[in-house]
Image (cartoon, rainbow, N blue to C red):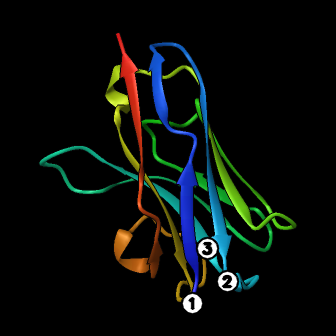
């Protein structure tokens, strides 16, 4: 069992930056895949970025490519999402997720087994 706790959300002006953290407790195995998703009211959860726990391979949604960076610190059992050049359309609740099942990077929320409680990111224009 893995518990995930996000932090780092808040209110920022357009063009600004935020760094989200996702602290994992419990055993995170090297085969795990980690992801960040976001959701706004009335919409489905949207893929943002994903990373393999073992080798650090990454993949991004087109909407955030070049602006967001996902990384992980194995020693700290923590995944990060560095968000730069934020836009009002990035406003959402951001969720961290972990998958013990997939063999590689996945953009589907159905592939993830564990979820954090979410952290609100609001970008003002």
Circles 2, 3 touching at the beta carbon (< 8 Å): no
In the rendered image, which residue does mark 1 sit on?
1
Circles 2, 1 touching at the beta carbon (< 8 Å): yes
Q: Which mark is residue 33?
A: 3
Q: Is residue 52 left or right of residue 124?
A: right
SS for callout 2: loop
Q: Residue at x 87, y 67 (%)?
A: 75
2 or 1: tag closer to the N-terminus: 1
Frontmost residue, 12 versus 52: 12
SS for callout 3: strand
Other residues around mark 2 within 10 Å, as few (<14) / some (14–19) / many (≥20): few
Give the Cα distance between marks 2 and 1: 6 Å
Circles 3, 1 touching at the beta carbon (< 8 Å): no
SS for callout 1: loop
Other residues around mark 1 within 10 Å, as few (<14) / some (14–19) / many (≥20): few
Other residues around mark 3 within 10 Å, as few (<14) / some (14–19) / many (≥20): many
Q: Residue at x 60, y 84 (%)?
A: 103
In the rendered image, which residue does mark 2 sit on?
26
Q: Residue pushed farthest right?
A: 75
Give the Cα distance between marks 2 and 3: 15 Å
């Amino acid at each position: 069992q893995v518990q995930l706790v996000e932090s780092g959300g808040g209110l920022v002006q357009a063009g600004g930056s935020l760094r989200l953290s996702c602290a994992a407790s419990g055993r995170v195995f090297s085969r795990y895949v980690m992801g960040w998703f976001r959701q706004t009211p009335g919409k489905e959860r949207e893929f943002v970025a994903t990373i393999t726990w073992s080798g650090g391979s990454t993949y991004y949604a087109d909407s955030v490519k070049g602006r967001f960076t996902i990384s992980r610190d194995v020693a700290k059992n923590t995944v990060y999402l560095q968000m730069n050049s934020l836009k009002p359309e990035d406003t959402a609740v951001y969720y961290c997720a972990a998958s013990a099942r997939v063999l590689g990077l996945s953009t589907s929320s159905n592939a993830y087994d564990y979820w954090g409680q979410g952290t609100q990111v609001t970008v003002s224009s």
